Image: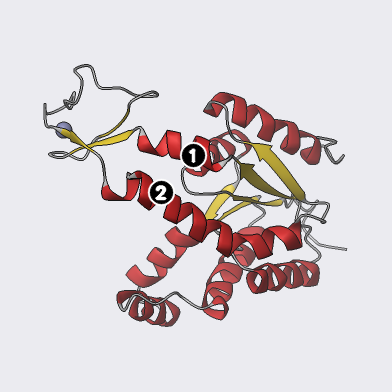
Amino acid sequence: MPEGGPVPQRMVIGILGPPGCGKGTQSERIQRTFHFAHLSSGGILRDEIRQQTPLGRLAGELMSHGNLVPDPVINEVMVRRLKSTIDHGDGVLLDGYPRTVPQLRHLIGKLEAWAVPLNAMLYLQIDDDSLVERLTGRRICGTCGAVYHLLDLPPTVPNRCDKCNGELIIRPDDAVDAIRERMRVYHNETEPILAEMQKEHYFYRIPAEGNPETVFHHIRQVLEPLMHGSPSTL
Ligand SMILES: [Zn+2]
């Protein structure tokens, strides 16, 4: 029996979805509402690089030459952070990890060894045309970098920044061809891990077409029953 009273509820969930699906917004809301520790692979790698840890130096070196950080390095960095967060008694929201089948298998193996369940992987599903529509509406101030959206967050004066009156431009990444290419790359990269997760009890598709409020409502419907110990039937 563990000492020191009851073991806190240790939930581990993950979130994934294509660029522009609203993953950042939803992660924030999950974190705020349910008090999960937010472990984002990008943020943690940047931390390691900033702190010049041995793994951080290796990752920084690879990235500065335009190389991907290999699975074993990502696994080690993420699993170490995951373990210390779980030991601390916090629930965990994984973001950007696992991204490949080897990462997923490594994670599952570790969780099994610690007897900690993977409670949910939330896949924010949205079709490519909706994503293109969403992303092509994005405008950035060429002067101060403020972000607008033609539909969701239009500037007061068309094409002018509310803050500095600078001209609004389309980021090269947000041009239609570039977006289509990002979608293609994303689907190629994630198809194998989606195929592997789809048959698992922890996999949930979240319809991500609607506004952030609606999407978060779907997420709540999955997470709340899990917190009370009965799996959602969504
Ligand atoms: Zn501006």
**Quadrant of the drawing holding the C terminus:** top right
Tell me residue 105's x, y (percent): 72, 71
- The secondary element bearing badge 2 is classed as helix
Q: Is residue 216 in view? A: yes
Q: Residue at 13% of width from left, 32% of height from top? A: 167
Q: Is residue 87 in view? A: no
User: On the rendering, which quadrant does ligand 1 occupy?
Assistant: top left
Quarter assignment of residue 43? bottom left
Reading the chain from its start, which is encountered first: label 1 or label 2?
1
Q: Do the numbered discs 1 and 2 sit on residues whose CB atoms are within 8 Å?
A: yes
Q: Which mark is residue 99?
A: none
- Residue that mark 2 sits on: 179
Measured in 3D between alpha carbons, the distance from the residue under mark 1 to the one under mark 2, in whole angstroms, is: 9 Å
Tell me residue 118's x, y (percent): 75, 56
Q: Pick the residue in front: 83 or 4.
A: 83
Q: Is residue 59 above or below residue 43?
A: below
- Residue that mark 1 sits on: 131
Q: Pick the residue in front: 134 or 75.
A: 134
Badge 2 density bin: few <14, some 14–19, many ≥20, Cα 10 Å: many
Badge 1 density bin: few <14, some 14–19, many ≥20, Cα 10 Å: many
Question: In screen coordinates, is 162 left or right of 85?
Answer: left
Kindly identify the amino acid type of the residue bearing the numbered disc 1. Leu
Q: Is residue 12 above or below residue 30?
A: below
Question: In screen coordinates, is 151 left or right of 105?
Answer: left
Q: Residue at 54% of width from left, 38% of height from top? A: 26
Q: Pick the residue in front: 55 or 26.
A: 26
Residue at the front extreme of this rendering: 177
Question: In screen coordinates, is 198 left or right of 165?
Answer: right
Kindly identify the amino acid type of the residue bearing the numbered disc 2. Ile
- The secondary element bearing badge 1 is classed as helix
Tell me residue 85's x, y (percent): 60, 59
